[in-house]
Amino acid sequence: MPERLHFTASDEANALIASDPLALLVGFVLDQQVTVQKAFAGPLALKERLGSLDAGTLAGADLEPVFRTRPAIHRFPSAMAQRVHDLATHVLDRYDGDAARVWTDAANADELKANLLALPGFGEMKIKALGAVLAKRFGVEAANELVPWHPTLGDVDSTEALADYQAAKRVHKKEWAKGAA
């Protein structure tokens, strides 16, 4: 297990998402229409505002005001508060609150993919990105088959690598948009 992931400017947030599986999942849920840095700083903001970042706390709290408190945790506080609540409830109900079981209970890539697809807010792109992080940063063998051919957050191992990843992603999105038009 890495000491930290390099997805934010905050060393504390980077350490949290590396050491707390639920924080990592929450970061991925929030990684939508905001920067990677903003999304993965969200779990630390939630922990600071709620005093805890466990599935029971998140599932039992009214998260919308927590998300709306300035600075807002996400640009869509209501929708993301609901999605994080749903994620925490799923982890609590399905995995007894132990988010790591999402991958440790999976015997192979198919089971892992099914576990990830069942998470609220997770689609194919997030499964590939999280699969790459699990395979490349955490050594989860069942995730190896989920790693896509293109660069993902799984390739980010430093602040510089994050900047390079984000620059390449912007170029890729522009090219993709041209192709779609």
Image (tube, rainbow, N blue to C red):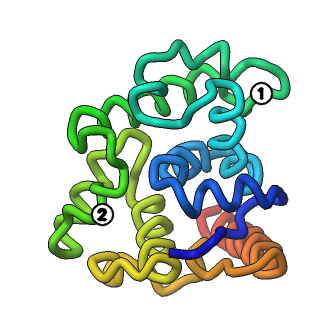
Q: Nearer the viewer, residue 110 or 40?
A: 40
Residue at 51%, 54% (x, y): give it.
Answer: 20
Q: Nearer the viewer, mark 2 or mark 1?
A: 2
Who comes first in sequence, dot 2 or dot 1?
A: 1
Give left or right: position of 4 versus 121.
right
**Quadrant of the rendered image containing residue 106:** bottom left
Task: In the rendered view, tell whether residue 34 sits above or below residue 180.
Answer: above
**Quadrant of the rendered image containing residue 89:** top left
Residue at 54%, 60% (x, y): give it.
Answer: 19
Q: Return the residue found at the far bottom.
A: 149
Q: Nearer the viewer, residue 87 or 166?
A: 87
**Where does residue 60 sit, x and y in percent of width and height?**
42, 17
Q: What is the crowding at mark 2: few (fewer than 14 residues within 10 Å), some, or many (at least 20)?
A: many
Label 2–label 1 contact, CB within 8 A: no
* Number of numbered labels in the structure image: 2
**Quadrant of the rendered image containing residue 150:** bottom right
**Where does residue 26 sit, x and y in percent of width and height?**
53, 44
Given the image, on which type of amino acid does mark 2 rest? Trp
Per the image, the residue denoted by label 1 is: 72
Q: Return the residue found at the far front.
A: 51
In the drawing, what numbered circle is on residue 136?
none
Give left or right: position of 117 versus 149.
left
Q: What is the crowding at mark 1: few (fewer than 14 residues within 10 Å), some, or many (at least 20)?
A: some
Give left or right: position of 56 versus 3.
left
Judged from the image, the secondary structure of the residue bearing numbered disc 1 is loop
Residue at 83%, 80% (x, y): give it.
Answer: 160
In the drawing, what numbered circle is on residue 103?
2
Residue at 63%, 42% (x, y): give it.
Answer: 43
**Where does residue 143 sit, x and y in percent of width and height?**
34, 76
